Amino acid sequence: MTPPPAARGFLATHGWGAADIVPLAGDASFRRYFRVVDAGRSAVLMDAPPPHEDPRPFVDIARWLHERGFAAPAIHALDLDEGLVLIEDFGDDRMREAIDADPVRALPLYRSAVDILIGLHQQPQAVLPPYDRAVLHREANLLTEWYCPAVGIDADQAGYSAAWDAVFDVALADVPVTVLRDYHAENLMLIEGGGLGLLDFQDALAGHPAYDLVSLLQDARRDVEPEIERAMLAHYTCTTGADAAFDAAYHVLGAQRNAKIIGIFTRLWQRDGKPRYPTLCPRVWRYLEQDLAHPALAPVADWFAAQVPPSHRGDPMAIAGR
């Protein structure tokens, strides 16, 4: 977590030359974050190094959200050639830790997070690529590309693709909305004024409104109590007038997202040397199995029943080590 060589010059150019640079965190990508502190003020330096990362989508969506009254971090300065962005500092109080410290806060915080989505979905979509059938397939295939080989399964890829293709119609929105795509308790910050600040939306696409809701309520990184998932799904549907088709889309997109995450977490272990991620897979498998029980997922559920036995559902690192 050493700051990139260009960081000092970039900060000096924008009035932060005397600031201390303190490592914050990396994430599952090549991006890294540093807190920049100077004389009682602070900001966050994002290092999104090209060619691995391109900060422009983050900047564009941050500005789009900010202009519409959503709490995305303000952009203070940027250098696209170096992949450096200086953004507003939302502090360290994440929704996840707030709930872990005081579970009584879970319901109101999740309700606030759902209300943000309701407001976002009332906006005309941002100018974004579509979350279309091709993207849904490509993401779902991460499970057969990474997880299945890791646990010794020679998967029926043709049958897998056909099963998903049979269910994706309900996951394609008639009126697409802005989908932030990584909307969960570790990317929601408790900020001044009592609101929630938004992070990690650089991969936004135009797609179905159920996607971010299932991202929030089937959180790969923490257990969301079933009663909270049911209550928040009911709150969203009652407020927006969503119907049974929305419920089907919620579970289809939940299954698709969870299959994708299992593949990504396996890849992070095998390709990128990050062994903590496969330990999260048992939780994601529980969500996936919950979604597969919905009637709309029958073809996909049949494929999993035939191809991935219960003994091969879990932590791929542990299963591979047996």
Image: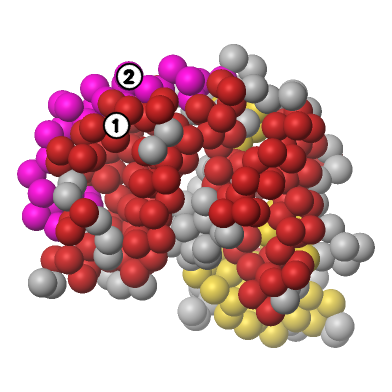
Q: CA distance from mark 2 to mark 1?
A: 8 Å
| Residue found 57% across the figure and 59% down from its top | 224
Q: Quadrant of the C terminus?
A: bottom left
Q: Which residue is mark 1?
A: 300
Q: Left or right of 100: which side holds 250? A: left
Compared with residue 316, is residue 38 higher up or lower down, i.e. above or below? below
Q: Is residue 164 visible?
A: yes
The magenta span reads: 146-173
Q: Position of residue 218 (x, y in %)?
A: 52, 51
Q: Residues within 10 Å of mark 1 (few under 14, many from 20)?
A: many
Residue 241 in the image: above or below residue 72? above
The image shows residue 126, relative to residue 267, as above or below, that is above
Q: Position of residue 23 (x, y in %)?
A: 58, 80
Residue 271 is left or right of residue 239, and the answer is left
Do the residues under discs 2 and 1 have CB atoms within 8 angstroms?
yes
Instruction: Please tell me in which quadrant of the rendered image residue 127 appears.
Output: top right
Q: Which mark is residue 166?
A: 2
